[in-house]
Image (cartoon, helix red, strand yellow):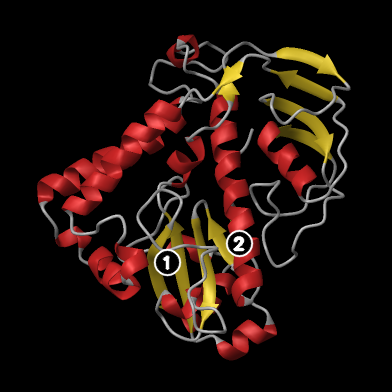
Amino acid sequence: MTEAWDWFRELTDDEKRRALYAVGLDVNMAFLAAAGRLTLPLSGPVHELNPVFDKRIPGSWLVDLSHVETDPLLPSPFTADGSRPTGPAWYSTVKVAYALELGARVQPTEGWLRHEHGPYLDPWYKRLRQAYVDTMAALGVPLTLADRDPVAFLDAMAAVKQGDPAELAVLTAIKQTAKGTIGKMRERPHGHGYKPGERWAALDRPTWDPLMRALVIDTATVNFHRKLLRMADDTGLHCFAVLSDCAVFAAPGPGVLDVLTKPEGTLTTSLRLGISPGMVKHEGSRPMAEITELIADDANPARHMKAGGVVSADE
């Protein structure tokens, strides 16, 4: 059982003093990016007691990660709500490996492990990535534009929705294919005829595998956490809200470059502007006065950054 982040915190005194705006940055096709070259299960689970952790084996591990120290201004990478774990829980291989990367010692007490594995989704990832890049180029945003001219890239992205309706329809289909495929791996029962406790049709599909979904989502979360840590080191900025693949930062102005510019004046590459899956684009900006009201109402500001409407957690 795992989900993407839905987290926010109170602003620090420093953020309140210097920030007039909140700026949201969205990771392009985050789950698609996570699927490329990812090791996924190709066999059924085997139950093992006190297994020795092996990051090469996809599986679920019962382990206590409550002792792992992470940046308190960022969400914990180990829970969906960003809070620190409080005791043993089941984690995918991806998150246990990340705990080791952060310097923790781990000793799982149980595991459901898949000893046959491979990059099952890599061909799917490559086809969709190429389709996405080609379609964005047709809509006026070529792959290398952000590196050549960040301002021109931001202008071109702002104009995408006024592009060719046929290309926009293709873009929507690509995004829905990426999101829908991951969701189908753990499709829930639905329909008027379903009775609780009964099997449902999706369980009989060979592609129904909640562990695959968890590994993709957890990889996206871990990748994002790494980037947010590097972002804090590069710029001194910590996000104060995250919803899935959108992070919100306090900034002196409403522009993306107000967030991504390092003190010496160059752009950070920790969160890199661009259209390639895994890079970031502008999600939206709002005056900080509106954001503090949302936080006071216990609402995640990242859900309200998108221009023109509220963003759902699975978008």
Amino acid type, mark 2: Leu
* Mark 2 neighbour class, 10 Å CA radius: few under 14, some 14 to 19, many 20 or more: many
Q: Report x, y in % for residue 94.
A: 67, 37
Marks 1 and 2: CB-CB under 8 Å?
no
Quadrant for the N terminus, please: top right
Residue at the spot x=85%, y=25% of the render? 52
- Residue 305 is marked as 1
Residue 300 image offset from top left, x and y in percent: 54, 63
Q: Position of residue 123 (x, y in %)?
A: 40, 27
Q: Amino acid at mark 1?
A: Met
Residue that extends furthest to the bottom in the rendered view of this protein:
17
Answer with the quarter of the image where residue 115 lies: top right
Q: Position of residue 16 (x, y in %)?
A: 61, 85
Q: Is residue 286 above or below residue 142?
A: below
Secondary structure beneath dot 2 equals helix
Res 150 visible:
yes
- The residue depicted at 68 percent of the width and 50 percent of the height is 77
Q: In the image shown, does 264 or 246 lie closer to the viewer? A: 264
| Position above or below: 121 against 293 | above
Residue 8 in view of the camera: no
Assign a secondary structure to mark 1: loop
Residue ID at (51%, 63%): 271
Nearer-the-camera pick, 177 or 81: 177
Instruction: Please report the residue visible at 75 percent of the width from the left and 38 percent of the height from the top.
Output: 96
> Disc 1 and disc 2: Cα gap in Å?
18 Å
The residue that label 2 is drawn on is 228
* Total numbered badges shown on the rendered structure: 2
Q: Is residue 123 left or right of residue 240?
A: left
Left or right: 15 as drawn, with respect to 277: right
Say which label, 1 or 2, has the lower sequence index. 2
